[in-house]
Image (cartoon, helix red, strand yellow):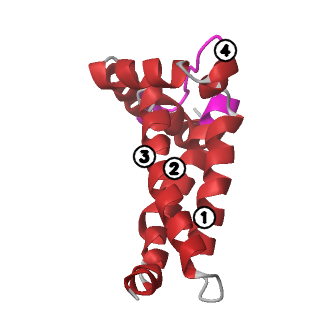
Amino acid sequence: MGQIQRAMRAGRCRRFAYPAALLGLLDGLGRALRPGEGFFPESAFVTDAYTGLLEFGDNPLSDGAAALTGLLPGGIGAAWWFPVLLSVALIMLGRTAAKSTVKARRRLGAFRLAVAGSLLMLVVLFSTGLLALGSGVLIPLDGLLGG
């Protein structure tokens, strides 16, 4: 009976899984759009924001997160598609945990995996010092604002 009651509340994982998935999609976009030689914005507002991101990226938290993602095989922690794939998994897990037609064990499993996936997404986001996440917002914004 307790398992059924916990499963009824498992859909609440969408409160943190969906925002983490959105941030992961922006991070993947930033990783894909950022040129290898660096990003040099034209807009003054974007330049100030990007400079702040570069300064924030030099902290021990991002170094530790980068070391953790460096442990993943094949360097997939640095690939643009990894946060996107993790975002898709978080959306699917949130949907599974919220379905009332799914058995209680499966809903609880989806909830627990969504918690673990959201924590992994935080590590992936901090591995670049939030630079890729900011690039996913600032590069298209610089294209809109222009010089």
Q: Which residue is mark 2?
A: 117
Q: Residue at x 36, y 21 (%)?
A: 64
- Name the residue furthest left: 60
Q: Residue at x 41, y 32 (%)?
A: 126
Tell me the kind of residue under disc 1: Leu
| Foreground tag (1 vs 4) | 1
| Foreground tag (2 vs 4) | 2
Marks 1 and 3 in Cβ contact (< 8 Å):
no
| Foreground tag (4 vs 3) | 3
> Magenta segment, which residues?
30-47
Mark earlier in primary sequence (1, 3)? 1
Number of residues whose C-alpha sits closer than 10 Å to that of mark 4, classed few (under 14), some (14–19) or many (20 or more): few
In this picture, residue 61 sits left or right of residue 46: left
Q: Residue at x 59, y 88 (%)?
A: 100
Marks 3 and 2 in Cβ contact (< 8 Å):
yes
Tell me the kind of residue under disc 2: Gly
Q: CA distance from mark 2 to mark 1?
A: 9 Å
Q: Which mark is residue 60?
A: none
Q: Residue at x 43, y 62 (%)?
A: 16
Q: Which residue is mark 1?
A: 93
Mark earlier in primary sequence (2, 1)? 1
